[in-house]
Amino acid sequence: MTERRSRIAVDMDDVIAHTIDRFAEIYRKNHQIELNEKILYGKEIREVLPPELKHTVSTYVNEPGFFRHITVMPGSQKVLRELTGRYDVYIVSAAMEFKNSLIDKFEWLQEHFPFIPWTNIIFCGHKIVDVDIIIDDRIRNFVGFGGRKLLYSSSHNMLVEGYERVNNWQEIADRLL
Ligand SMILES: [Mg+2]
């Protein structure tokens, strides 16, 4: 029997895509509100917005184009490419939550991660996937998963404890390569 390579599921938002930066840019430009790591420490964006603006988070993420114009998380392209040499790498994103994100996310991946074939892109709801390692910034995506869980640090999860945490892509490289 040939042994299969280990599989890794990698999340998109706030793991390979710097989605918080996109929000920061929008709220700075449209509402003159500063969202930075210090303000967002341990909090969701919604929680730090004034009451009259809380609903705008879902408005923005549902707009076509929101997910097409996000900066790439530093180091993620290089390390992910290296990981593909050792592991079967899958991009697993709960994209079904936002129907307009589907094409945006696919095109974004084709532009920034062209070495990930379409066969290794999984847009889903719940992340019920047969992999060995999951890298994600949301612990809700670890529920029921028996493999190795790497919690990617993001301002909103900084107060979460009890998980193997990685703070950047270099740390992922150090642990997995
Ligand atoms: Mg995420």
Image (cartoon, helix red, strand yellow):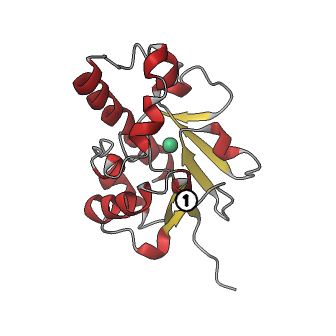
Location of residue 121 with respect to 167 vertically, above or below: below
Residue at 35% over, 32% down: 23
Q: Nearer the viewer, residue 104 or 77?
A: 104
Q: For this view, does 57 lie left or right of residue 112?
A: right
Q: Position of residue 39 (x, y in %)?
A: 41, 13
Viewport quadrant of the N terminus: bottom right
Q: Position of residue 63 (x, y in %)?
A: 37, 47
Q: Nearer the viewer, residue 124 or 169?
A: 124
Q: Amino acid at mark 1?
A: Ile
Of all residues, the one furthest to the left in this rendering is: 29
Q: Nearer the viewer, residue 102 or 83?
A: 102
Q: Nearer the viewer, residue 25 or 111?
A: 25
Viewport quadrant of the C terminus: bottom left
Q: Look at the image and tell me whether residue 87 can be seen.
A: no
According to the picture, the residue beneath numbered tag 1 turns out to be: 8
Q: Quick one: label 1, few (<14), some, or many (20+) residues within 10 Å?
A: many
Residue at 53% over, 19% down: 42
